[in-house]
Amino acid sequence: MQGDDPATRQERLRSILRHVATGAALSEPEAEEAFGLIMDGVADDVQIAGLLMGMKARGETQDELLGAVKAVRSRMKALHEPPPDAIDVCGTGGDGHGTLNVSTSVAFVLAGLGVPVAKHGNRALSSKAGASDVLTALGVPLKDDVVTLGADLRERNLTFMAAPHHHPAMRHAAGVRRALGVRTLFNFVGPLANPACVTRQLVGVSDAAWLAPIVDTLAKLGSTRVWAVCGEIAGSSLRWIDEITLAGPTHVEALQDGVRHRFILEPEMAGLSPAPVSAIAGGGPEENAQALEALLRGSHGPYRDTVLFNAACGLHVAGRGQVLDAAGQVDGTVLRELVKLAASSIDSGAAFASLEAARGVTG
């Protein structure tokens, strides 16, 4: 507990580590305590790495995820007066593919259509270029004032929340995560701890086994409409990708009106042509930023189609279309219409105008 003296808290951490070392799972309260101890600076780098890798080697549980998210949420700096219908589009990262930044592009497309997007992101910890890296390369300032960020979201339908500004306690684990360079439970925690407290999310997941636990966790935390998505890449040693993909089927776990649905999306259902993951291979922040700006200026190709596919589904999650009927069946006609609507955001210049507004360009 936070009120305990340092020696007591250190002994509690060692007890948790001994428990994990036996291969046993943590209960939700134990996980909340463990991650709280990390974020309160009690754990050193060796202890943090031991906990994360011990859990990963055994296989993390849903209770551990929920406990970790509660610990992070209880310590975050929340946004000031966000709109109740705001949406986040965010991937867990850690899939190893190093693609161009899809969810960041989707944020501009949705904002261009009047959807309030509270985009949560970070710098690269297990990838080449995280959302914050690319936004910096684009000249988008990463603000840290929760009142200003809330006003941006209400007035411009878009705000970017850099994780370190809202989760300062996460700094205690950042070095370890960067040094490990692999997916840990923190990859799944980040998208579930949005500082705008959104209840609508399109979450890209790097492992299909985590689709249901992530939706379950968000449901328990009060979310109302969620799509957790994971693309499957046939014939690749890296089987999964944390976005809706053109390279194979996308597995979806959805929460809608209190009901859970599971289904598959194929690019043809959206009127789009399949394409390999290599067609959207990314690089460093500057390279990815150039591709993103070219996309918003009207460049065509697999990157645009991938963004349109994801944006169309984001429109559904935001309540701007009804791709999924009450029985959990995908309406391809509606999906294709939402792809066209997403394309209109780019082709009209609205998506690029959202980028310019985020940069602070007026006129």
Image: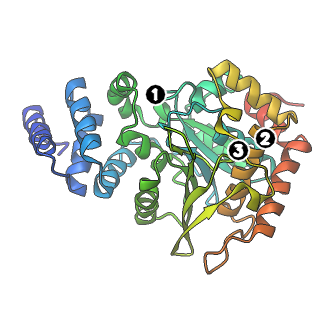
Mark 3: which secondary structure? helix
Q: Amino acid at mark 1?
A: Leu
Q: Disc 1 marks which residue?
A: 125
Between the C-alphas of marks 3 and 2, the distance is 10 Å
277 shown above or below 230: above
Mark 1: which secondary structure? loop
Q: Amino acid at mark 3?
A: Val
Q: Disc 2 marks which residue?
A: 304
Is residue 200 among the parts visible in the rendering?
no
Q: Earlier in the sequence, mark 1 or mark 3?
A: 3
Between the C-alphas of marks 2 and 1, the distance is 25 Å
Mark 2: which secondary structure? helix
Image coordinates of residue 30 in percent, x first then y, are: 19, 51
Q: Earlier in the sequence, mark 3 or mark 2?
A: 3
Q: Disc 3 marks which residue?
A: 106
Q: Which quadrant of the figure has residue 9?
A: top left
